[in-house]
């Protein structure tokens, strides 16, 4: 468990870097700049933590309960985020998944800023969440 947590921490720390050719999806207009950053939510009666990391270069990283990691490329259009080339890794096994998408929006409540977005499934046979959840920075 300690090794998995260390690996996840290392990946989250390096996910903020742009790719080798310096592409920046925000400046190209393919990414809504408000989505950039690390967002998290805890859901369910058996609490499960989800952490999303959206980077300006269009890379996406998700950690589910410190055990499952998902990577993808993303872009946004008209309040929808699209994930492509989705790969989920659990322990040593990597599984490609179908492309995903979710509507998203932003708001503020007594606890601060949030983003409403689906919890993306890490299994091919399980749909993404409906309803959406309040992810916070």
Image (spheres, rainbow, N blue to C red):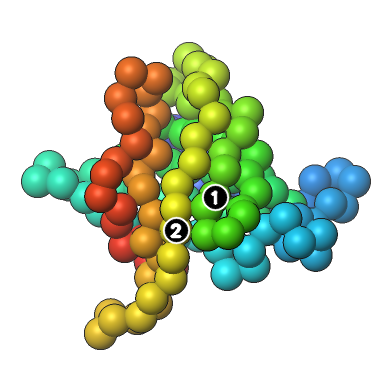
Percent x, y of residue 128: 34, 36
**Dot 1 corresponds to which residue?**
81
Percent x, y of residue 83: 57, 39
What is the residue that sits farthest to the right in this orientation?
21
Percent x, y of residue 136: 38, 66
The one of 69 and 10 positioned closer to us in this rendering: 69
Say left or right for 51 vs 98.
left
**Dot 2 corresponds to which residue?**
104
Q: How many marks?
A: 2
What residue is rendered at 30% in x and 25% in y? 126
| Marks 2,1: beta carbons within 8 A | yes
Residues packed near mark 2 inside 10 Å, few (<14), some (14 to 19) or many (20 plus): some
What residue is rendered at 43% in x and 71% in y? 106
What residue is rendered at 36% in x and 48% in y? 118
What residue is rendered at 80% in x and 46% in y? 19
- Residue 76 to residue 68: above or below: below
Q: Can residue 13 be seen in this view?
A: no
Say left or right for 97 vs 114.
right
- Residue 90 to residue 39: above or below: above
Label for residue 33? none
Q: Earlier in the sequence, mark 2 or mark 1?
A: 1
Quadrant for the N terminus, please: top left
Quadrant for the C terminus, please: bottom left
Percent x, y of residue 25: 75, 55
- For the residues marked 2 and 1, what is the alpha-carbon distance in whole angstroms? 7 Å
């Amino acid at each position: 468990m300690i090794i998995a947590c260390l690996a996840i921490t290392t990946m989250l720390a390096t996910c903020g870097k742009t790719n080798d050719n310096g592409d920046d999806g925000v400046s190209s207009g393919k990414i809504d700049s408000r989505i950039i950053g690390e967002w998290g939510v805890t859901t369910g009666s058996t609490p499960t933590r989800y952490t999303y990391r959206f980077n300006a270069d269009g890379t996406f990283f998700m950690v589910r309960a410190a055990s499952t990691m998902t990577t993808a490329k993303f872009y946004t259009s008209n309040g929808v985020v699209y994930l492509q080339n989705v790969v989920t890794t659990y322990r040593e096994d990597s599984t490609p998944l179908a492309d995903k998408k979710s509507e998203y929006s932003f708001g503020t409540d007594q606890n601060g800023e949030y983003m409403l977005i689906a919890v993306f499934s890490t299994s091919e046979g399980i749909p993404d969440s409906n309803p959406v959840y309040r992810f916070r920075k």
